[in-house]
């Protein structure tokens, strides 16, 4: 294995610190550091490769690490469905992969870490309800609002399951800051307003 001076490793560590634990191949080139050092650090377990040209600190783990890594690797994507439900505490189901929404005509992102499930959205639905929410490591993640996430769950009920969608709605109604108007507006965009109204009436 090629030897690298401690000063080069220190510069990589400093760059990682400035970028919240993530670094790109081009950052190394711009800093005048041998880019092969990244491969060495991956082999030594110091870094993880998320996708080609993008790496993260292997030990920098938090409950939201997967969400952050996925949205950095696919900056146009939005965290959705089970991953968003889990983020907001609206489900007892723990997703084994990060659910990402992308526009219907976009190519799916190539991500090596974490495992992702890509859901294609229509143009209007994709752009509605996108928020930037704080995560455990102090950063933010692109994720749909609570109301849009619930509407999506009813729209994609074949993916998340009816029980999960209903559980999310019941939990949401018990949470502070709920907005029935916001929920119905999101449901209209997702074309599930009549279905959601019927559940709201049944739960009233």
Image (spheres, rainbow, N blue to C red):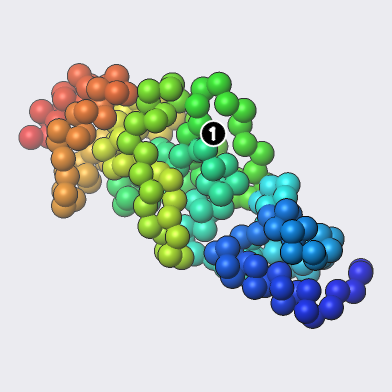
Q: Residue at x 48, y 34 (%)?
A: 101
Q: Is 194 rendered above or below residue 55?
A: above
Q: Provide the residue designation for mark 1.
A: 118
Task: Between residue 28 and residue 82, name the one nearer to us.
Answer: 28
Mark 1 residue crowding within 10 angstroms, few (<14) / some (14–19) / many (20+): some
Q: Residue 83 sits in which quadrant?
A: top left
Quarter of the image for residue 162 reads: top left
Q: Nearer the viewer, residue 29 or 174?
A: 29
Q: Residue furthest bottom?
A: 6
* Visible residue check, residue 50: yes
Residue sticking out furthest to the left: 204
Q: Examine the image and state in which quarter residue 9 appears.
A: bottom right
Q: Quadrant of the C terminus?
A: top left
Q: Name the residue nearer the viewer: 149 or 4.
A: 4
| Residue at x-position 40% and y-position 34% | 160
Q: Is residue 101 left or right of residue 21?
A: left
- Residue at 46% from the left image edge and 65% from the top image edge: 137
Residue 53, given in percent of the width and then of the height, sits at: 72, 50
In the rendered image of this protein, does residue 56 appear above or below residue 126?
A: below
Q: Position of residue 191 (x, y in %)?
A: 29, 19
- Residue 126, image x, y percentages: 41, 29
Tag 1's secondary structure?
strand
User: Quadrant of the image for the N terminus?
Assistant: bottom right
Residue 83 seen in render: no
Could you say which is closer to the camera, residue 64 or residue 154? 64
Tell me where residue 112 appears, x and y as whole percent. Answer: 67, 47
Q: Residue at x 57, y 42 (%)?
A: 74
- Vertical placement of 152 versus 82: above or below? above
Q: Is residue 11 left or right of residue 153?
A: right
Instruction: From the viewer's perspective, tell me whether residue 29 is left or right of residue 84.
Output: right
């Amino acid at each position: 294995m090629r030897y690298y001076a401690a000063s080069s490793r220190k510069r990589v560590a400093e760059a990682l610190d400035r970028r919240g634990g993530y670094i790109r191949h081009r950052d190394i080139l711009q800093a005048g550091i041998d880019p092969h050092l990244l491969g060495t650090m991956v082999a030594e377990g110091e870094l993880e490769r998320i996708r080609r040209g993008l790496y993260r600190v292997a030990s920098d783990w938090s409950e939201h690490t997967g969400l952050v890594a996925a949205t950095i690797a696919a900056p146009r994507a939005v965290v959705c469905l089970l991953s968003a439900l889990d983020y907001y505490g609206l489900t007892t189901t723990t997703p084994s992969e990060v659910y990402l929404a992308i526009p219907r005509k976009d190519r799916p992102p190539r991500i090596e870490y974490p495992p992702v499930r890509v859901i294609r959205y229509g143009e209007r639905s994709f752009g509605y309800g996108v928020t930037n929410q704080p995560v455990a490591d102090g950063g933010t993640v692109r994720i749909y609002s609570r109301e849009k996430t619930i509407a999506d769950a009813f729209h994609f009920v074949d993916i998340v399951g009816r029980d999960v969608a209903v559980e999310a709605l019941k939990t949401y109604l018990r949470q502070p800051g709920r907005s029935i108007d916001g929920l119905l507006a999101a449901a209209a965009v997702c074309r599930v307003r009549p279905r959601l109204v019927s559940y709201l009436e049944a739960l009233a």
